[in-house]
Image: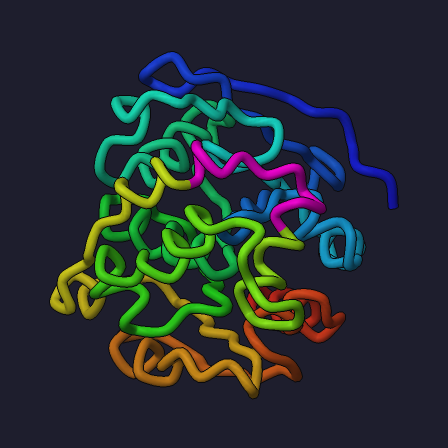
Amino acid sequence: MLAPPVQTFTAPDGARLAYRVVGSPADRPLVLFHGYVSTGPTNWIRYGHAELLASRGFQVVMPDLRGHGDSARPHDASAYPPDVLTSDGLALVEHLGLTDYDLGGYSLGGRTVIRMMVRGAAPARAVVAGVGLDDVVAAAERTDYYRNVLTHLGTFERGSGEWYVEAFLRTVSGDPEALLLLLDSWVDTPLSDVRAVDVPTAVVVGAEDDRGARELADALPHSTYTEIPGTHMSAVTRPELGQAIADALR
């Protein structure tokens, strides 16, 4: 499936942010957020998830997060204040005029969905995939791995986890400087806030992705838990991910 045309909107701070839409305007809106270093088309179109969800009656909206893809990639630290991705997500929902909609995300995108609900977003249903409890409650402490990769590009042993992240960065034409600055915007979510989320939320994780996703599902008061094949990096490529999202939102 070819990527649909890029559409843009202006965030409250003036940044131009990109998104794409697959599906009919008459169908149910579903906003899907991609993972760190990735893009909307890479996460959701390349592996067929958007096409599947559109066939199930969803209009799938796929933003490129700030610092990624076709969205603004400023090299100014002031463009990445605390929790900026959540602010951008809330601004997109407002821009689209959504009142009855669903939210979903993978990895960083899943954490963004939780942050949006903590800050007042009211989707009817949500899916958070590839996210564990520590990713949410201790997000600011979990940036060291990516800082190491982004500041030591070209030094990693072929086949190592860091080497694969760097290779992926190249395939999506990622911007290391913007991505480094974005890490400073990650904020922790108190466990009490997670437990107060009042939205039915499906937690989906790769069976080989040991991220504490079950603990996240236990903390969310209205949750389901589903495992699909794969690791953190490979689960997003599996057709079972799109199917799990469709089943959770059915």
User: For this view, does 61 lie left or right of residue 200?
Assistant: right
**Residue 49: percent from left, percent from top:** 73, 58
Q: Nearer the viewer, residue 3 or 203?
A: 3
The image position of residue 168, as x and y in percent, is 65, 53
Q: Does residue 157 appear left or right of residue 126 in this picture?
A: right
Colour convention of the picture: rainbow
Q: How many marks?
A: 0
Report which quarter residue 99 is drawn in. Answer: top left
Instruction: Locate the C terminus by quadrant.
Output: bottom right
Q: Is residue 222 left or right of residue 137?
A: right
Where is residue 117 shown, x and y percent of the image? 30, 51
Residues shaded magenta: 169-179
- The quarter holding residue 79 reads top left
Q: Residue 158 versus residue 22: which sits nearer the camera?
A: 158
Residue 238 as seen in the image, left or right of residue 205: right
User: Going 50% across and 56% down the picture, which residue do you hit?
Assistant: 105
Would you say residue 164 is visible in this rendering?
A: yes
Percent across and percent down for residue 181 are 34, 36
> Please, which residue is most extreme toward the top here?
14
What main secondary structure does the magenta stretch of the protein show?
Answer: helix
Give residue 91's quadrant in the image. Answer: top left
Residue occupying image coordinates x 54% and y 57%? 155
Judge whether residue 91 is colored magenta. Answer: no
Q: Is residue 144 above or below residue 45?
A: below
Which residue is located at x 15 percent, y 68 percent? 191
Q: Of 173 and 44, which appears nearest the observer?
A: 173
In front: 144, or 126? 144
Residue 174 magenta-drawn? Answer: yes
Instruction: Answer whether residue 59 is visible to the viewer in this image.
Output: no
